[in-house]
Each structure stands twice: as C-alpha cells, then as structure tokens.
Image (cartoon, grey):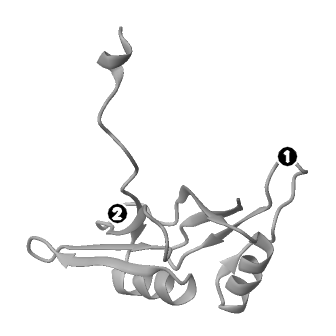
Amino acid sequence: MSEAATKTRITSVGNVGVPTTDQDRALEFYVGKLGFEKRRDVTFGPGLRWVEVAPPEGTTTVALLPTPPGSPVGVDTAIRLLTADAEADNARLLANGVDTDPVLRFGEDVPPMFTFRDPDGNTLYVVES
C-alpha cells in the first residue's frame, strides 16, 4: 500500500477524556488544585454538559466526562502531563492536598515522574520534560 493511501489528515490530539462522577467537583480540582484553565463548559442535549480544561499553555485539553451509573471511575488514565520540574510540582500538589505519590527516579535515561489521583481516584502521571 502506498504512503498516500495510508495517511490521514489527522494533525493533532484535541482532547483526552477522564471519567468523573461530579463535573463541578472535577472542574474545581483541575482548575483550583492543578492550575488548569477552563476552556469549555457547554450544555448539549437534555441534561448533558461538556467540560474541557487544559494547562495554561497547553493545546490538548482534558475532557471531564460525566460517567453513567455503573461505569468505572478511578481508572488509570494513562495520561502523561509534562513539567519542567517534577520535584517542585510534586511538592506543590502535596501542599494543595492532592493524593500524590513520591517522585520516581529510574536513572539518567528516564525522566523523573510521579503519579497523582483526582477526586474520583483516576490516576494521572507527571513527567519531567
């Protein structure tokens, strides 16, 4: 198959989703504790709401998805957030009361990183870039 036949016109990742049981509580956490900006908060359809947050200079947003009853929350999102200083951000999040693990260091070829959990127990990662 030719390269032209396999390429799409996809240019970037727009957003990633995180399940939440309470969008207001999640929004307060991501904006108030992580320092993200609210980028979108709109209603669509009866009783449905679309909420997106992102780091101040980020281009990819995190959608705070309403989770239907019986659907899992408290998942490993596999989302990696980048920082210039993992140690400083870990300390800041701990001081803000975030459920945070210690910074891990695996050697000089692997950047320092740590995990934290949002109010629904979803795990996210912070990796020093």
Q: Nearer the viewer, residue 76 or 70?
A: 76
**Which quarter of the figure is the C terminus placed in?**
bottom right
Toward which corner of the image does residue 42 lie, by quadrant?
A: bottom left
Q: Element type at marker 2? A: loop
Q: Give left or right: position of 46 versus 4.
A: left
Q: Element type at marker 1? A: loop
Q: Amino acid at mark 1?
A: Asp
Q: Amino acid at mark 2?
A: Gly
Q: Nearer the viewer, residue 27 or 89?
A: 89
Visible residue check, residue 24: yes
Looking at the image, is 60 positioned above or below residue 85? above
Looking at the image, is 48 positioned above or below residue 24? above
Few, some or many C-alpha atoms within 10 Å of disc 1 (few <14, some 14-19, many ≥20)?
A: few
The residue lying at 77 percent from left, 79 percent from top is 88
The residue lying at 49 percent from left, 72 percent from top is 57
Q: Position of residue 11 (x, y in %)?
A: 36, 43
Q: CA distance from mark 2 to mark 1?
A: 41 Å
Of the image marks 2 and 1, the number of the one nearer the N terminus: 2
The residue lying at 51 percent from left, 90 percent from top is 32
Numbered tag placed on residue 70 in the rendering: 2
Q: Position of residue 45 (x, y in %)?
A: 9, 70
Few, some or many C-alpha atoms within 10 Å of disc 2 (few <14, some 14-19, many ≥20)?
A: few
The residue lying at 48 percent from left, 67 percent from top is 58
Query: Which callout, 2 or 1, points to the residue nearer the camera?
Result: 1
Give the labeled residue for mark 1: 109
- Identify the residue at the far top of this view: 1
Visible residue check, residue 18: no
Q: Position of residue 86 (x, y in %)?
A: 75, 70
